[in-house]
Amino acid sequence: MSAQILSGKVFASQFKEEAKQEALSLKEKYNVTPGLAVIIVGSNPASKVYVANKHRTCEEIGIYSEVIEMPETTTKKELIAKIDELNNRQDIHGILVQLPLPEAIAKEEADILNAIMPIKDVDGFHPVNVGKLMTGQKDCMIPCTPHGCLKMLQAANINIDGAHAVIVGRSNIVGKPMAQLLLSQNATVTICHSHTHNLKEICQSADILVAAVGRPHFITADMIKPGATVIDVGINRIAPKKLVGDVDFDNAVEVAGAITPVPGGVGLLTIAMLMQNAITAAKLQLAK
Ligand code: GUN
């Protein structure tokens, strides 16, 4: 039997609507418009598309959006000076530096991201926010993609409590925070990666399988327990106009109980959760 399709479009529009209502209420109660600044350094074509989507979605939700384009040759010092300027602006509640950074400053990524005030860190990448997530503190920014996945699982009434969640991928952006979020909901969590022994057997024991490896069709149907929920975080371009996930969807859909498609899945949730984080940042700053 074919799995239930968890449509990113449906859940993202629900999460964006929540953000829209919150933005309206901040305006009515406090006359505050949440403001988001997105810095893009250089001219990576995929990054340009992502940033344009973020800008358009802000306008749709009622969030003030400022896109700051900096040249490929920008130095770490210049970029941190721009971040400092935004840290000090009252009308900007959230700051995001689009990744990847150009090669010349890529190795400085940690220092650059650490320059964003934790309370304005809408990506949730700052060590203060990572630590708060790890210790279960409420006033923290949660990375958008894993947060969207968790909210989708909850909205779709997928049981997490006591479930075995297997995450394939250990990135700071998805794998690690996803593990923490599922653990906070009482899942038993296993993180797998390129050195994991018996990957297939571990995946076969997952009630919830999250694929975040960045390799097209890496998770095949025989790795999935019948009836499991499969979340595909991968977005892999295999031809100019062909995007596929980390899961072999066409075969996996016959085994899983519920599954996200690519495109039209998790990718849409990320922007929706960025909108929610911009609102959360504005609220935290208002409460200060
Ligand atoms: N590039 C691709 N995904 C992301 C993301 O979630 N945040 C940032 N800052 N850059 C990205």
Image: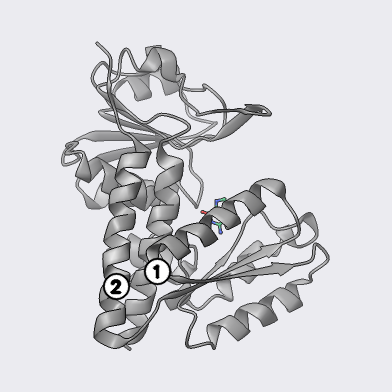
Q: Secondary structure at mark 2?
A: helix
Task: From this view, report whether residue 83 is shown above or below residue 60.
Answer: below
Q: Looking at the picture, which amino acid does disc 1 mark?
A: Gly
Which of the 4 image quadrants contains residue 265? top left
| Residue at 70% from the left image edge and 65% from the top image edge | 108
Circle 1: element type: loop
Quarter of the image with the C terminus in it: bottom left
Q: Is residue 100 left or right of residue 60?
A: right
| Label number found at residue 129 | none
> x, y (%) of residue 21?
26, 66
Work out whether 195 lies above or below 74.
Answer: above
- Assign the N terminus to one quadrant of the image: top left
Ligand 1 found in image quarter? bottom right
Expressed as whole percent of the image width and height from the top left, the position of residue 252 reads: 38, 17
The amino acid sitting under disc 2 is Leu
Residue for badge 2: 24
Q: Residue at x 35, y 52 (%)?
A: 147
Quarter of image, res 82: bottom right
Residue linked to disc 1: 62
Which quadrant holds residue 81? bottom right
Mark 2 Cα-neighbour bin, 10 Å: few <14, some 14–19, many ≥20:
some
Q: Nearer the viewer, residue 252 or 10?
A: 10
- On the image, the x and y values in percent for residue 111 come to 64, 70
Please give left or right for residue 58 compared with residue 229 in the image.
Answer: right
